Amino acid sequence: MSSKDCGHHEDESRKLIRLILFGVGGFFFVVLLTIFIIWAVLRPTKPKFTIQDATLYAFNLSSPATNTLTITMQVTLSSHNPNRRIGIYYSNLHAYASYHNQQVTLATELPPTYQGHKDFTVWSPFLFGAAAPVSPFTLSSLQQDRGAGAVVVNVKIYGRVKWKVGTWVSGRYHLFVNCPAYIRFTGGGDRSGSGIQIVAPAKFQLLQGCSVDV
């Protein structure tokens, strides 16, 4: 084969490589442009959660001999879908109460639901924690809150969400929600020694926004 033929084949190979690179680059450009257009048109926004109220049926911190916390409460949680063109599927939702990042109740499952455009959904789960062991740090914090006359219990939700646009449904995304509930120590409760007990039932109107991560 002459050097002229070799040069011709090399030119053809370089042209083919350039065409492949241009094709791949063009494909990714179209994909990115499509994603940008969809985002610009739909403006997807994560749901907004609010804790409306909390009814406390039991809140009893034992003496230092056992260091356990018993808590029973019902909370009213609402979720709002702010999107005009996007629906939201909720699944595998669970709610529990925590104090200083320590879980103090069992996780309660919430029913799965679909939330249409601009719709609201309300859940009212019961949260139970019977004689849950608390750490020395948690015990110390509760004693300080007792002196201040109020305690902040965080109601947390975790689960999955999917977005729906027309007939298209996305994959599942993790959902994490944190709702602070400010509970006041009502008069007549037992605060003797190191124990804490709130007179129950006691209902607290909260209307507090929650942090949401998707």
Image (tube, rainbow, N blue to C red):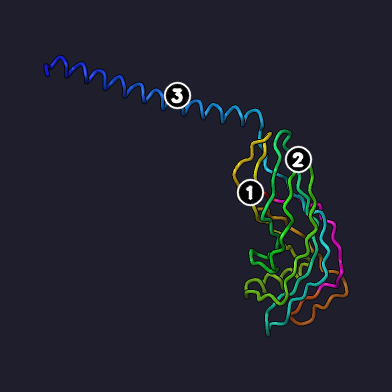
How far is mark 2 from mark 1, CA to CA?
Answer: 20 Å
Of pointers 3 and 2, the one earlier in the residue sequence: 3
Dot 2: within a 10 Å radius of its alpha carbon, few (fewer than 14), some, or many (20 or more) residues? some
* Picture residue at 70% right of the left edge, 43% below the top: 88
Question: Foreground: 131 or 34?
Answer: 34
Is residue 16 placed above or below 191 in the rendered structure? Answer: above
**For the residues bearing labels 3 and 1, Cβ distance under 8 angstroms:** no
The magenta-colored residue range is: 198-210
C-alpha gap between disc 3 and disc 2: 36 Å
Residue 86 x, y percent position in the rendering:
70, 37
Dominant SS type (magenta): strand
Disc 3 residue type (three-letter): Gly
Residue at the disc numbered 2: 116
Asked which secondary structure carries label 2, the reply is loop
The residue identified by callout 3 is 26
Q: Residue 213 has which mark?
A: 1
